[in-house]
Image: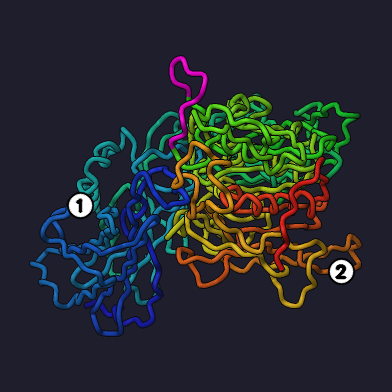
């Protein structure tokens, strides 16, 4: 045993020792947490040397499963193959193994036998992770290296003719350092001494060839010191494929002995200048767009509808091509000559945003501006993007628009029939919801068979407010790229001072854009990647919104969901996520002010009116009456006779007790300065809790919050109501009371005829 094994307190570095990243199937969870396919777990290893003179190597491992739980591990020492599990693998739930190096079989004279410990994680459905491993000798643990940029994998990395390669290294049993004392690397091509393609097929043959090279071990390889963990390769041939190989050496002369395309071997293909360059992303509160590639994007501008009469901040960043760094950015608004540097900002690494406007188009005519953004990398390759700003003034000439973004069962007609087939799913179907929400009332039900006397419809919950309505299922042309690619253009929303947007829980899980039966919801579409969120732009313009239905939070966040925190159900968090699924630039964060963590699920719950605001500790009651329903209760035959509400429906389809619900899971107090004078502070709670939910199927013994009212000081004095449940599934009088509360009590709208007044509970 070499003396350096005596080192104490060796840092524990969680290093990827083998193939640790698995390509996962691209499916979304529904609020019911039902996946169309299972995702394999991932396992990582951490080797550490124990106390002085112990000669013991302890290998710790940890498994994670994005959509379930790790059930057990499979462990093997010196298996015939790390890619195939046989009888030599042992099942265990323990997460570490101690290897006494002094007890390993002695090597024969002239031998230096390598040993390998391999671990796989297995989840509760039997899915198995890719293997993770560490190597060791009887008297030494060799160093491990990992190329970090470009990230190596089984596929090809596309790089520029000048590329910078970075790596990390660890020596678990180092005495004076826990890093390799030096690194060596080589670059193989088709005409090198050892052919590139052969090294890809037989990495061990390549290793043995250079270890036993007739001119000496590793002849022709380049070296770096322990402190140099990068190299810049220049003058690579465009169109050519290369293989970069890296190894690290420890104090005893041992080197990184296991070679793979996920750790120390990097396949590269060199692109031609002008086809690469940084990949630019531009974003703000109402859009997030990443150009599909680097290069010149001026011929494919990003069209964005923006509000008028206010300053708008645009942010950007760029990802360099593999092996390069971002060096600087610059931007220009409406330049007349792109070659004139005086019309651009200076080149700077800190130029990553610009405040533009306010824009004031004359009358209602649209005004257009063009923002150009250019990014340059360390190889002096540049990319340029163009954002076309279409300024849409807000007229707010209409009072109320209801956007029906639900995806309930549409009418289906049989051959020669004038009446649709009876609905087959739970109430409501699409036509039934339209009737429940918008019917003027006292009209004979159509197509109700032989029911006598013919039942009369009741006035819809919104009928007294005479809203304009739009159904996004019929606006497929917007989903196909019309109106600047928006499902509901800002020019439509800006005609109304108030918008109620309704999205149901099941419809929010649809993923097909052009499916005529179950199409993607408009809310999910415009809260996705490379889409324009006109609802967010409308709120920023000063429009008031009620976002409702039990699926809106899911639709607004799912395209940025981090599955790692989705157990036991879909979760959107600024606390536990590592992918920015809930943060600035997300609709629920910016305008609903749900900024901690919220969940979406299907459950039986009790929803009661809240007292005071969310922080509720000594604050004054809000300046509006409480919502009239003290508790939202399911329909019953006594309160909502099926013969009057849904004559052809069965009791089981009409009277439901389980709902899609979305709720704040963690504390979410929002306190903001409401005084516009920068020298005067007036901190006030700006997020009011309207209802709380309890239920055995929820996830913490607290009262979760499914309905809030945010009245923030942002431009336009934001008024944003969010209710994460289908208000139409509760008693009609309570649903009517909720509609009246938002439209009449919060927004000050007056019904055109006296609306039924719900009794206010004490």
Instruction: Answer few, some or many: residues within 10 Å of disc 1's Cα (few below 14, many 20 plus, some between 14 and 19).
Output: few
* Residue range (magenta): 413-424
Nearer to us in this view, 415 or 358: 415
Left or right of 523 on screen, residue 366: right
Q: Earlier in the sequence, mark 1 or mark 2?
A: 1
- Name the mark nearer the viewer: 1 or 2: 2
The span from disc 1 to disc 2 (Cα, nearest Å) is 75 Å
| Numbered-mark total | 2
Position of 123 relative to 294 (above/below): below
Quarter of the N terminus within the rendering:
bottom left
Q: Main secondary structure of the magenta part?
A: loop
Q: Which residue is mark 1?
A: 212
Q: Quadrant of residue 745?
A: bottom right
> Which residue has dot 2 on it?
681
Which residue is rendered at x = 42% and y = 43% of the image? 27
Residue 282, numbered circle: none
- State the residue at coordinates (20%, 54%): 82
Q: In the orientation shown, which residue stands out farthest toward the front?
A: 453
Pointer 1 and pointer 2: residues touching (CB < 8 Å)?
no
């Amino acid at each position: 045993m070499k003396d350096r094994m005596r080192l104490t307190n060796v840092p524990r570095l969680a290093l990827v020792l083998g193939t640790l990243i698995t390509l996962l199937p691209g499916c979304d969870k529904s609020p019911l947490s039902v996946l169309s396919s299972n995702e394999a777990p991932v396992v990582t290893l951490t080797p550490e040397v124990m106390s002085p003179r112990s000669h013991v190597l302890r290998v710790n491992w940890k498994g994670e499963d994005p959509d379930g739980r790790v059930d057990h591990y499979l462990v093997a020492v010196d298996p015939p193959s790390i890619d195939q599990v046989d009888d030599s693998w042992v099942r265990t739930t323990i997460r570490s193994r101690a290897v006494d190096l002094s007890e390993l079989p002695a090597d024969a004279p002239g031998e230096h036998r390598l040993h390998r410990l391999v671990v796989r994680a297995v989840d509760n459905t039997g899915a198995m992770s890719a293997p993770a491993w560490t190597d060791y000798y009887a008297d030494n643990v060799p160093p491990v290296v990992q190329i970090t940029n470009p990230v190596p994998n089984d596929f090809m990395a596309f790089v520029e003719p000048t590329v910078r390669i970075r790596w990390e290294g660890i020596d678990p049993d180092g005495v004076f350092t826990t890093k390799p004392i030096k690194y060596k690397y080589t670059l193989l091509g088709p005409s090198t001494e050892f052919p590139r393609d052969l090294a890809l097929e037989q990495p061990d043959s390549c290793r043995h060839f250079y270890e036993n090279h007739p001119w000496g071990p590793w002849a022709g390889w380049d070296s770096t010191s322990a402190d140099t963990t990068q190299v810049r390769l220049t003058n690579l041939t465009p169109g050519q494929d290369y293989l970069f190989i890296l190894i690290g050496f420890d104090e005893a002369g041992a080197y990184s002995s296991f070679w793979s395309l996920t750790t120390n071997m990097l396949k590269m293909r060199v692109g031609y200048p002008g086809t690469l360059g940084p990949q630019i992303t531009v974003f703000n509160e109402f859009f997030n767009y990443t150009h599909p590639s680097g290069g010149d994007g001026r011929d494919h501008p990003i069209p964005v509808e923006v509000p008028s009469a206010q300053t708008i901040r645009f942010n950007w960043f760029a990802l360099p091509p593999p092996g390069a760094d971002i060096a600087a950015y610059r931007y220009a608004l409406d330049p007349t000559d792109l070659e004139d540097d005086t019309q651009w900002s200076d080149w700077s690494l800190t130029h990553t945003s610009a405040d533009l406007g306010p824009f004031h188009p004359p009358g209602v005519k649209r005004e257009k501006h063009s923002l150009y953004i250019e990014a340059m990398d360390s190889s002096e390759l540049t990319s340029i993007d163009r954002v076309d700003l279409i300024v849409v003034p807000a007229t707010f000439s209409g009072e109320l628009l209801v956007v029906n973004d639900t995806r309930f069962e549409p009418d289906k007609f049989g051959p020669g029939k004038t009446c649709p087939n009876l609905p087959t799913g739970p109430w409501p179907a699409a036509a039934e919801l339209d009737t429940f929400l918008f019917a003027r009332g006292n009209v004979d039900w159509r197509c109700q068979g032989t029911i006598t006397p013919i039942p009369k419809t009741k006035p819809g919950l919104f009928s007294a407010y005479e809203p304009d309505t739009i159904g996004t299922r019929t606006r497929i042309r917007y989903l196909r790229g019309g109106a600047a690619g928006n499902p509901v253009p800002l020019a439509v929303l800006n005609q109304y001072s108030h918008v109620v947007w309704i999205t149901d829980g099941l419809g929010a899980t649809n993923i097909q854009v052009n499916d005529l039966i179950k199409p993607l919801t408009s809310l999910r579409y415009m809260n996705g990647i490379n889409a324009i969120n006109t609802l967010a732009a409308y709120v920023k313009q000063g429009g008031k919104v009620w976002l409702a239905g039990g699926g809106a939070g899911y639709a607004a966040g799912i395209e940025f969901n981090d599955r790692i925190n989705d157990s036991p159900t879909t979760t959107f968090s600024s606390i536990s996520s590592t992918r920015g699924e809930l943060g600035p630039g997300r609709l629920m964060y910016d305008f609903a002010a749900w900024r901690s963590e919220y969940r979406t699920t299907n459950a039986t719950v009790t929803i009661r009116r809240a007292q005071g605001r969310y922080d509720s500790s000594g604050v004054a009651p809000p300046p509006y009456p409480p919502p009239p329903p003290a508790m939202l209760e399911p329909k019953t035959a006594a309160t909502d006779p099926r013969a009057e509400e849904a004559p052809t429906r069965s009791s089981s389809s009409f009277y439901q007790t389980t709902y899609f619900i979305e709720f704040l899971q963690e504390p979410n107090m929002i306190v903001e300065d409401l005084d516009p004078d920068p020298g005067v502070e007036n901190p006030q709670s700006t997020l009011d809790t309207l209802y709380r939910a309890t239920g055995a199927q929820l996830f913490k013994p607290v009262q979760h919050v499914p309905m809030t009212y945010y009245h923030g000081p942002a431009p336009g004095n934001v008024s944003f109501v969010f209710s994460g449940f289908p208000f139409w599934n509760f008693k009609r009088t309570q649903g009517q009371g909720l509609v009246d509360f938002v439209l009449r009590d919060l927004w000050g709208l007056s019904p055109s005829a006296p609306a039924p007044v719900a009794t206010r509970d004490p």
